[in-house]
Amino acid sequence: MWSISYWNWAKPSEVEVDLDIRVTSADALGRLTAMLPQADWWAHRPDQEPYAPVPSSDNGDDPYESLPIHLRHWCVEPESVEAALEAAGGEMVAARWDFSSWPPVPELGLGNTCRCAFITVSFNARSIDPDVPSADHTLYIHTEQFHPERATWLASQVGLKILGEPQMSAL
């Protein structure tokens, strides 16, 4: 199982995690709804017209009759991510860790900032939204728009390197 390690600047009490899970099986749905009973969900219908009604938790629809679905739960404890991944099995999961701020990087002339201080790990998925399946995981480092060098510095702190070009995110 994969686990997150916090850098010495990230206080677990100042971190929250949002989960977005594409659920395709009834078994995974049962495990996930038992663990995250307050999660919202909506049917995954990429081929449907944008304004067509989609079955969802808001409508009181049955998620088992609506598979595949996206299941979303905001503000889970960081310690619960591994249990959610275990419950999800091989389903595609995006977990976003929201930090209170990024640390200062004096060697780059960057102070600490609370803007865009989060990372997303897409498990079994190649995209930031869990839509494109993959046999591995992808880590996204979100930083303020005008300082993408912070992402390179952050990745180097845990022995990683940036593989792609900076991208603008809708988040």
Image (cartoon, rainbow, N blue to C red):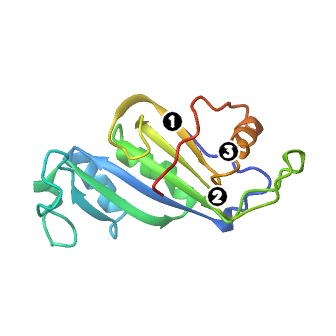
Marks 3/1 in contact by CB < 8 Å: the verdict is: no
Question: Which labelled disc corresponds to residue 117?
Answer: 2
**Vertical order, 162 against 99 (above or below):** above
Residue type pointed to by label 1: Thr
In this rendering, would 64 be left or right of 120? left
Left or right: 151 as drawn, with respect to 140: right
Judged from this view, the residue extending furthest toward the front is 146
Return the residue at label 1. Answer: 138
* Residue 1 shows in the view: no
Residue 156 seen: yes
| Few, some or many residues within 10 Å of mark 3 (<14, 14–19, 20+) | some
Residue that badge 3 annotates: 148
For image coordinates 37% across by 48% down, the residue present is 87
Frontmost residue, 149 versus 34 = 149
Residue 132 image offset from top left, x and y in percent: 34, 36
- Find the distance from the CA under tag 3 to the CA under tag 1: 18 Å
Query: Would you call the spot at circle 1 few (<14 residues within 10 Å), some (14-19), or many (20 or more)?
Result: some
